[in-house]
Image (cartoon, grey):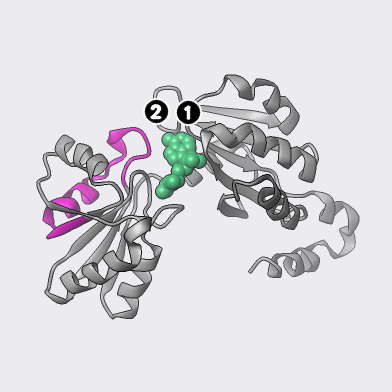
Amino acid sequence: RPTLYVVATPIGNLDEMTPRAVEILENVDVIAAEDTRNTLKLLSHFHIKTRLISHHQHNETQSTNGLLDLLEKGNDIALVSDAGYPLISDPGGVAAKKIMDAGFNVVPVSGCNAMLDALVGSGLNTQHFMFYGFLQSSEKGRTSELCDLKYFPYTMVFYEAPHRIEKCLRTMLEVFGDRQICLARELTKKHEEFIRGTIEEVLEIVDDLKGEMVIVVEGSQDIKDDREDAAVPLVHEQIKQYI
Ligand code: SAM
């Protein structure tokens, strides 16, 4: 059966590209890319000459019909985004679902992903965690989303645009109070850095930080402190609100 491969590509260091990912990009009939110019650079590095088409968030519905058409004609397709896993704060979710529903194979091809690298390097609890992705960019929207997460008991991972990191940390301090966080910066690149400390401590140096960043935040301690006897069932009750 024709297959859509959802292929992770590097988030910084080209050596993150796995041999399996290279082989799949070489062997599929078409590569659907978030930004064909970006992907072309990756493909030239690996001497891959597969045909490229565009699949980004502004044409996702229309382009999904095109992908379905190609699959129906027997073509295998690889879907890639600009960095990391497609579908993870990147386009591809609409296409993958429609293509699954139409009965085609959808196969993830793993590689690097900023969320997991940030979590593993954060020093915070990795047993239970939640990936939130991007908060809303408006102050009001961000505050409201963070208020909903105030008592979430497990580690939380957020993506944020570089120019909004400081604003975002200020809102987190206001809503959550001071907590342990980690800013994971320039992952897998030359200036990779894990800045660990309380929100207030990190805010003191955030002005000087450049590049891409992930914010990892300690979960709320309040539930455990306030309701020690019933901690486990109550934590699960709490989690249900988020599912
Ligand atoms: N699909 C990607 C993934 O699997 O990680 C995420 C793409 S999302 C549009 C971009 C965000 O991911 C950035 O704003 C930043 O929060 C995070 N990010 C991506 N690459 C990064 C890197 N090398 N270092 C730190 N954060 C990164």
Left or right? Give the position of 32 relative to 202.
Answer: left
Mark 1 or 2, nearer chain start: 2
Badge 2 residue CB within 8 Å of ligand 1: yes
Q: Nearer the viewer, residue 35 or 206?
A: 35
Q: Which mark is residue 211?
A: 1
Left or right? Give the position of 25 relative to 150.
Answer: left
- Position in image of residue 103 (x %, y %): 28, 80
Mark toward the viewer: 1 or 2: 1
Task: Identify the residue at horizontal 30%, vertical 73% (top origin).
Answer: 99
What amino acid does circle 1 point to?
Gly
Element marked by disc 2:
loop
- Position in image of residue 83 (x %, y %): 36, 43
Q: CA distance from mark 1 to mark 2?
A: 10 Å
Task: Identify the residue at horizontal 58%, vertical 53% (top origin).
Answer: 132
| CB within 8 Å, label 1 to label 2 | yes
Left or right? Give the position of 112 relative to 139.
Answer: left
The residue tagged 2 is 189
Element marked by disc 1:
loop
Point out the image quarter for the N terminus.
bottom left
Q: Nearer the viewer, residue 225 or 97?
A: 97
Quarter of image, res 68: bottom left
Task: Identify the residue at horizontal 46%, vertical 30% (top origin).
Answer: 186
What amino acid does circle 2 point to?
Lys
Task: Identify the residue at horizontal 34%, vertical 67% (top origin).
Answer: 61
Badge 1 residue CB within 8 Å of ligand 1: yes
Ligand 1, image quadrant it occupies: top left
Q: Is residue 173 visible?
A: yes
Q: Is residue 137 above or below residue 121?
A: below
Q: Is residue 126 visible?
A: no
Could you classify mark 2 by the number of other residues whose Cα lies within 10 Å: few (under 14), some (14-19), or many (20 or more)?
Answer: few
